[in-house]
Image: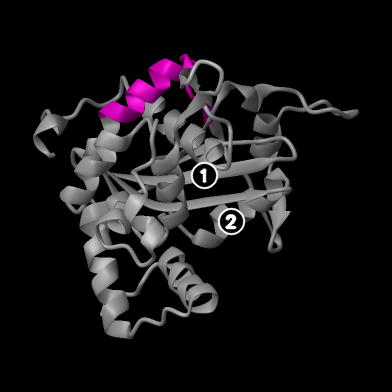
């Protein structure tokens, strides 16, 4: 039996602890299988609680159509072993804030999103140790233009320079070289994500949190005008969405999909 993602285990635990709804292993497996197809519509179609029947898919979500395609075509699941291929990383680096990293393999005309990591309140050394510990063979590391910003202090070095010089990690020097992602507007970046998402396949376990955040990334609501603003809401989804946007922008002019996907035919 395929293991159930942690986010669903937490959901089932909450159902049991708060609402007294206890599911058997068979029921949990059924729920997981159904959710793979329905995505955010699962709670509305098969509610565990009465209130869930009235939940809508995330309104104002930037990538709702693309994720409908990914779910319907089972592009969020278990990935084949392509460990012989190198990995590219794409970062959103915060200062004393959250940092997000996506791990991507290019497999033919597809992009296999094999892993994801995010954390907050940690320095660059922490994230470099994460890369080292994961043990992938890396082809490139990519970050936005502010990787070249100078840090405060006597040395006034940029994080790009610090990463190139490296740290001693587990008794040996470990360094990485960052490439700078081309600078595009947020709107152009969002459009790049929309273009590349149908050519992506996600590891549903290692990327569970990142996928949930990317799917929920949405516009900000204007209470006064009663409509969506033409800019993203800055919340817990932002860093993962920004890092994925840098991935899409960096690939925009490097590789074109070998086929076109009509998202309108999927629902």
Residue that sits furthest to the front in the current view? 50
Compare marks 1 and 2 and give the one earlier in the sequence.
Answer: 1
Residue at 49%, 74% in the rendered image: 19
Pointer 2: residues within 10 angstroms few (<14), some, or many (20+)?
few
* SS category of the residue bearing label 1: strand
Q: Give coordinates of residue 65: x percent, y percent.
A: 25, 35
Label 1 neighbour load within 10 Å: few <14, some 14-19, many 20+: many
Residue shown at the point (49%, 35%) measured from the top left: 243
Residue picked out by circle 1 = 101
Q: Nearer the viewer, mark 1 or mark 2?
A: 1
Magenta residues span 179-195
Residues under numbered marks 1 and 2 in contact, where contact means CB atoms less than 8 Å apart? yes
Residue 42, percent across and down? 28, 57
Q: Which mark is residue 130?
A: 2
Quadrant of the image containing the N terminus:
bottom left
Residue at the spot x=32%, y=76% of the render?
Answer: 28
Q: Quadrant of residue 177?
A: top right
**186, above or below 137, in the image:** above
Picture residue at 62% right of the left edge, 44% below the top:
175
Judge left or right: residue 227 versus residue 203.
Answer: right
Is 190 in the magenta?
yes
Please tell me which residue lies in front, 86 or 100.
100
Percent across and percent down for residue 122 are 72, 49
**What is the C-alpha distance between the residues marked 1 and 2?**
10 Å
Residue 234 appears at what percent x and percent y? 58, 31
Q: How is the image coloured?
A: one colour
One can see residue 251 in this view: no
Q: Is residue 135 above or below residue 145?
A: below
């Amino acid at each position: 039996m395929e293991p159930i993602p942690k986010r669903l285990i937490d959901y089932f635990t909450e159902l049991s602890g708060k609402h007294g709804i206890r599911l058997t292993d068979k029921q949990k497996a059924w729920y997981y299988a159904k959710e793979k197809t329905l995505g955010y519509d699962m709670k509305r179609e098969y509610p565990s609680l009465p209130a869930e029947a009235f939940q809508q898919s995330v309104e104002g979500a930037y990538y709702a159509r693309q994720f409908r395609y990914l779910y319907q075509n089972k592009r969020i699941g278990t990935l084949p072993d392509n460990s012989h291929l190198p990995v590219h990383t794409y970062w959103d680096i915060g200062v004393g804030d959250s940092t997000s990293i996506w791990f991507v393999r290019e497999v033919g005309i597809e992009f296999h999103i094999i892993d994801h990591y995010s954390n907050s309140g940690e320095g660059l050394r922490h994230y470099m140790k994460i890369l080292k510990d994961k043990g992938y063979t890396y082809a490139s590391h990519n970050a936005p233009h502010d990787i070249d910003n100078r840090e405060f202090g006597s040395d006034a070095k940029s994080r790009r320079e610090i990463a190139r010089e490296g740290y001693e990690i587990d008794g040996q020097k470990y360094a990485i070289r960052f490439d700078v992602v081309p600078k595009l507007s947020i709107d152009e970046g969002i459009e790049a994500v929309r273009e590349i998402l149908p050519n992506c396949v996600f590891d549903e376990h290692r990327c569970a949190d990142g996928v949930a955040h990317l799917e929920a990334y949405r516009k900000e609501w204007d209470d006064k005008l009663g409509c969506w603003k033409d800019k993203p809401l800055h919340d817990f989804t932002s860093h993962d969405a920004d890092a994925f946007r840098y991935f899409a922008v960096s690939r925009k002019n490097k590789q074109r999909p070998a086929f076109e996907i009509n998202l309108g035919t999927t629902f």
